[in-house]
């Protein structure tokens, strides 16, 4: 499970870099009306947690292992330390 967490962290970190590079974060910041979504996009911890959660839902539906829902917290912490 540790290897899966580290690979997921690397994948999410790359996805976040790609999102920043193409300007999607700035686009959402300019066009969003919700204060909650604006704060989520600005916060790297929140963004990495929600991206990882979106990726873990299909894994959970295939395997029905509840430990997949712990991985977003670990990945968000790892990415927060790295950035």
Image (tube, rainbow, N blue to C red):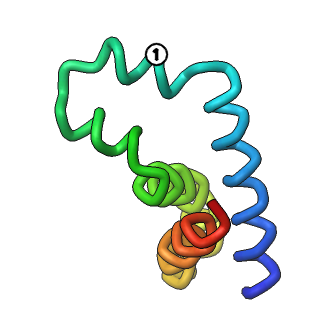
Left or right? Give the position of 46 relative to 15: left
Residue beneath the point at 62% across and 31% down: 20
Left or right? Give the position of 48 relative to 20: left
Q: Quadrant of residue 58?
A: bottom right
Reply above or below: 77 against 31: below
Q: Position of residue 19 (x, y in %)?
A: 63, 31
Front residue of 34/61: it is: 34
Front residue of 58/36: it is: 36
Left or right? Give the position of 66 relative to 22: left
Q: Quadrant of residue 35?
A: top left
| Residue position for label 1 | 27
Q: Position of residue 52 (x, y in %)?
A: 56, 58
Number of numbered callouts drawn: 1
Residue beneath the point at 62% across and 73% down: 78
Can you say which quadrant of the picture contains the C terminus? bottom right
Left or right? Give the position of 23 relative to 6: left
Can you say which quadrant of the picture contains the N terminus? bottom right
Element on which disc 1 rests: helix
Reply above or below: 31 against 57: above
Front residue of 42/69: it is: 42
Q: Position of residue 12 (x, y in %)?
A: 68, 53
Reply above or below: 26 against 83: above
Residue beneath the point at 21% across and 40% down: 36
Q: Position of residue 44 (x, y in %)?
A: 48, 52
Residue beneath the point at 55% across and 78% down: 74
Q: Quadrant of residue 41?
A: top left
């Amino acid at each position: 499970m540790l290897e899966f967490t580290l690979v997921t962290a690397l994948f999410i970190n790359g996805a976040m870099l790609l999102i920043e590079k193409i300007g999607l974060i700035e686009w959402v910041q300019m066009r969003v009306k919700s204060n909650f979504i604006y704060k989520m996009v600005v916060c790297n911890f929140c963004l990495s947690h929600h991206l990882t959660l979106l990726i873990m839902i299909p894994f959970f539906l295939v395997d029905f292992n509840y430990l997949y829902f712990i991985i977003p917290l670990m990945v968000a912490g790892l990415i927060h330390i790295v950035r």
